Amino acid sequence: MARPFHPMEIERMGVVGGGLMGSGIAEMGARAGIDTVVVEVDGDAAVRARQRVEASMARALRSAKLTEEAVESARGLLRYTADYEALRDRELIVEAVFEAESEKIKVFSALDRMVDSPSVILASNTSSIPIMKLAMATQRPASVIGIHFFNPVPVLKLVELVTSLLTADETAARAEAFATGQLGKLVIRSRHRADLLEHRRLDAPVLGDRLHDQRAVGELRHVGDHPHAGFLTCA
């Protein structure tokens, strides 16, 4: 009998792109106690990424959603750089650059050449590009998956996990464990590309068994009703 698979927790993550989504993903990682590196195109962009995270955590502190100790702890786990070398030892990397297929393919090709670990998870926050296209830009398509967050990332609990035909079951299990067990998110599974956008005008029950947790039904409605839910700017 095969032994049950118990994913190891992610201890070192990277985020490529420190815009609205990337900075939110990085913030969540650090708040979960994960050593987190944000890589941007240049030093100025890295500074802006830091400012976005700091502003978000300051809002959470003012609203009593974070304590001063939690903010300091997260701050100590965050680094911002323009150097891809900082990603070499990461166990999970989330690509969150702007929604252009050619740019995302460049990122995945670069990550494939750069990262040392053969077990690294290469994830994309894309809301529209097929995961298979990004996977084929690498020599490790089984390690490529979509982890599609919603804006604002620290507030909205849903995450859409998107696999391709080549995504390994272990990759999907580890990504789901990261999203649920470490970040405290609720996961919806999709195939090939994130398609929750196609259902944004439908009632949650239409999604049926795609919702692994009944709490996700309420969260889906909350996403649709949230005044800052950036459905057209999710990636």
Image: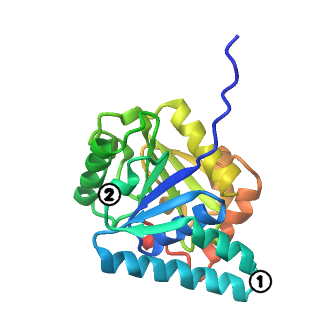
Q: Is residue 54 above or below residue 202?
A: below
Label number found at residue 64 = 1
Q: Identify the residue at image location x=54%, y=72%.
A: 151
Residue furthest to the top in view is: 1
Q: Please say which color scheme the image uses.
A: rainbow
Q: Is residue 66 visible?
A: no
Residue furthest to the front in view is: 76
Question: Residue 70 location, x and y as percent?
Answer: 71, 72
228 and 83: which one is in front? 83
| Separation of residues labelled 2 and 1 (CA atoms) | 35 Å
108 and 35: which one is in front? 35
87 relative position to 68: left or right: left
Label number found at residue 84 = 2
Give the quadrant of residue 33: bottom right
Question: Residue 53 location, x and y as percent?
Answer: 53, 77
Label number found at residue 24 = none
* Amino acid, disc 2: Tyr
Give the quadrant of residue 84: bottom left
Q: Is residue 50 visible?
A: yes
Q: Mark 1 Cα within 10 Å, few/some/many (few <14, many 20+)? A: few
134 relative position to 202: left or right: left
* Amino acid, disc 1: Ala
Residue furthest to the bottom in view is: 62
Question: Residue 1 location, x and y as percent?
Answer: 70, 10
Q: Mark 2 Cα within 10 Å, few/some/many (few <14, many 20+)? A: some
Q: Secondary structure at mark 1?
A: loop
Instruction: Please tell me which of labels 2 and 1 falls first in the chain.
Output: 1
Figure quadrant of the C terminus:
bottom left
Q: Is residue 166 above or below residue 33?
A: above
Q: Is residue 41 above or below residue 213?
A: below
